[in-house]
Amino acid sequence: MFLVDTHTHLSLEIFDFDIQEVVRRAFVEGVKKFCIPNIDLISIPYVNALCNRFPCVCFSMMGLHPTSINTDYRKDLIVVRRELKKRKHIAIGEIGIDFYWDKTYAKEQIEAFEEQLNLGIEWNLPIVIHARESFLQIFESLYKVGINKLRGVFHSFVGDQKNLEEILKFENFMIGINGSITYKNAELQKYLSLVPIEKILLETDAPYLTPVPLRGKRNEPAYIVYTVQKVAEIYNLSLEVIAEKTTNNAKRLFDI
């Protein structure tokens, strides 16, 4: 099998001591490419360094995570623009709106999200969306900026069936599925099959969202195989078909 982990935070400090082994274990399981999201200004050099260390294996995104947004976000976006000019990135991400933890900077989150959507259009790059307790506002912003000019993925999808059905109206958007699909009470198991397999991307969101049966451990790309198994079960397809289809989807969206 050839797999792509389309969303993994391997640039975080928690992987510093054994990153070589993490990559090796992933390769053993067939995971050969990793898409690395950016979070804030502090994470930029770490993301870039990782991708320099593992060229043609790790691929960087550029953007500001919604929980990193504050009143100074415009200054931060100047740096993001500068980084887009300095080196190749595969996507604008991880961007979005998160009302789960805190709404203090709700207005700024929306503004920053819409500005970064426009960066996707300007640079002809897909967008990687983080949506938590914010789907209605996300949809409003997408329509406002121009849904037909955008393409991307709703990373780590945790919405309800109504949210999913709305996303399926967007011709150029995919759904990112990770270890949370393996959880006993995951509602998404009930309606994931509504999504054409051509719109599914696989991810780990490592070190977070470790799949069953390894919950409690640090997540890593090698564990994506448990997500593959659950998705194959839901679609009643072989592991090989799921791997082939989702890998082709990743290559098509991110041009990797």
Image (tube, grey):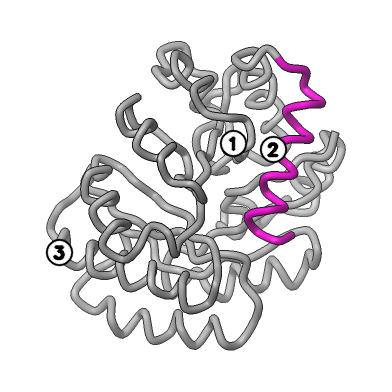
| Residue 134 image offset from top left, x and y in percent | 24, 45
- Specify the amino acid type for callout 1: Ile
Position of residue 171 relative to residue 1, above or below, is below
Q: Nearer the viewer, residue 195 or 246?
A: 195
- Location of the N terminus (image quadrant): top right
Say which label, 2 or 3, has the lower sequence index. 3
**Counting residues from the N terminus, which is met first, the one under dot 1 or under dot 2?**
1
Do the numbered discs 3 and 1 sit on residues whose CB atoms are within 8 Å?
A: no
Magenta-highlighted stretch: main secondary structure?
A: helix
- When the figure is inspected, residue 159 is found, relative to residue 73, above or below; the finding is above
Query: Image quadrant of residue 201?
Result: top right
Name the residue tied to disc 2: 246
Observer-nearest residue: 194 or 202? 194
Q: Residue at x 59, y 36 (%)?
A: 200
Q: Residues within 10 Å of mark 3 (few under 14, many from 20)?
A: some
Residue to which mark 3 is pinned? 107
Residue 200: which numbered mark, if any? 1
Q: Which mark is residue 253?
A: none
Q: Are marks 1 and 2 in contact (CB under 8 Å)?
A: yes
Q: CA distance from mark 2 to mark 3?
A: 35 Å
